[in-house]
Image (cartoon, grey):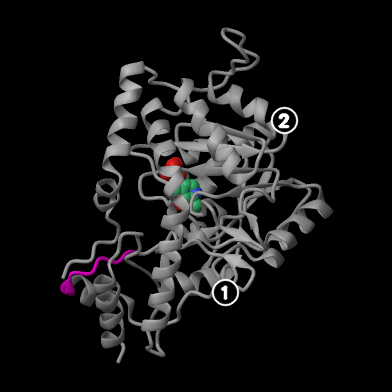
Amino acid sequence: MKVPFVDLKAQYLSIQPEIDRAIADVIADTAFISGSYAKKFEDEFSAYNGMKHCISCANGTDSLEILLKAMNIGSGDEVIVPAISWISTAEAVSSVGAKPVFADVNEHLLIDPVQAEKNITTNTKCIIPVHLYGNPSDMSVLMEIAGNHGLKVLEDCAQSHGAELGGKRTGTFGHCASFSFYPGKNLGAYGDAGAMMTNDDDIARLSRAIANHGQEGKHNHIMEGRNSRMDGIQAAILSAKLPHLDDWTNQRILIAEKYNKQIVSGKVVKPIVRENARHVFHLYVIRVPDRSAFMRYCSEKGIETAIHYPTPLPLLPCYADQRLMPADFPVAAKASAEIVSLPMYPEMTDKQINFVAEHVNEFFS
Ligand SMILES: *Cc1c(COP(=O)(O)O)cnc(C)c1O
């Protein structure tokens, strides 16, 4: 049996007429860049999250960078990011001229608030918690720390569409939030797309201007900005997909529950879901001994696995100038040698879920 890591084709086939119509409409209207379809999706996505402003842009990395700029963070400033994330989180900080300062993670592989606070200096301006794998970071503690030190909080929600903590959506705790709609994300376009979200009128106004050449109204360039807009086609696809997001998320949660129940080997550490959290399982990540042999075994059986991510950010060659060592991030360093992501997508069949769980159990028996 083949179990792919994700199957975007299966999802397309399940809603094909809606998607095809959405794309055809944009072409008929020649609304290719920003325009009415982007505006419609912005309204729908801000309503979905109960937030005042959603500003669409070209991708999730841009949205992080634009939000940092809109908060006037740049040269000489420090921004605290978790030691485990996709590189965009740190890259965006460097791109605006600030320094990413890495904090170790906790047992959930989410930024450890104690470590975040330890890294605060007089230059610190912002903390970027990442709701990694769809699991909400500890927002109440982080907001308290940020409040005590006068810091901004930018939530990286690239993996956490629809996730909640204490019944409140991720992306609604901080000063602003960044979303990616990369095709494989829980809400994915058919190309690159992203969005900024905030209740703050100033951050919203500046983000919108920066993403569109610094314009506030046509030809009124209040600053130099950049070109980071959402395609009409991507926006229309996202509008077609958004009404399905909650069903897809519930499917992901069900699949995770099945994995959790069926994977019984004592050698496997399964994801922990805290009682007050709605973990939306962008990824289902287990921790195992003997990882490379396990991944080879899965591959032979037709099961695709992946690692998110094999190296903690501070230990990547591009941050060698910070001279950081695994001992500076003991939790992240240990975890990154053990984590492996199992296939996870809403259209997985019970047969596939059973097949994966059986082989996990078999390998570790
Ligand atoms: C995907 C991702 C991003 C970047 O999104 P792009 O749309 O690919 O630029 C940022 N942060 C995290 C945690 C991500 O997973």
Given the image, on which type of amino acid does mark 1 rest? Glu
In this view, the residue in front, 36 or 124, is 36
Vertical placement of 364 versus 255: above or below?
below
Q: Label 1, secondary structure: give it.
A: loop
In which quarter of the view is residue 293 placed?
Answer: bottom left
Q: Earlier in the sequence, mark 2 or mark 1?
A: 1
- 211 relative to 304 in the view: left or right: right
- Can I make out residue 318 in this image? no
User: 222 above or below 290?
Assistant: above
Q: Which mark is residue 201?
A: 2
Which residue appears at 60% of the width and 59% of the height?
164
Q: Residues within 10 Å of mark 1 (few under 14, many from 20)?
A: few
The x and y percentages for residue 296 are 22, 74
Residue at 67% over, 25% down: 205
Determine which of the numbered discs, if any, sits on residue 107 in the image: 1
Q: Which residues are magenta?
A: 300-306
Please state which of the two labelled residues, at mark 2 or mark 1, is closer to the viewer. 2
Magenta stretch: includes residue 303: yes
Q: Residue 283 location in percent, x, y?
A: 42, 62
Q: CA distance from mark 2 to mark 1?
A: 36 Å
Screen quadrant of the C terminus? bottom left
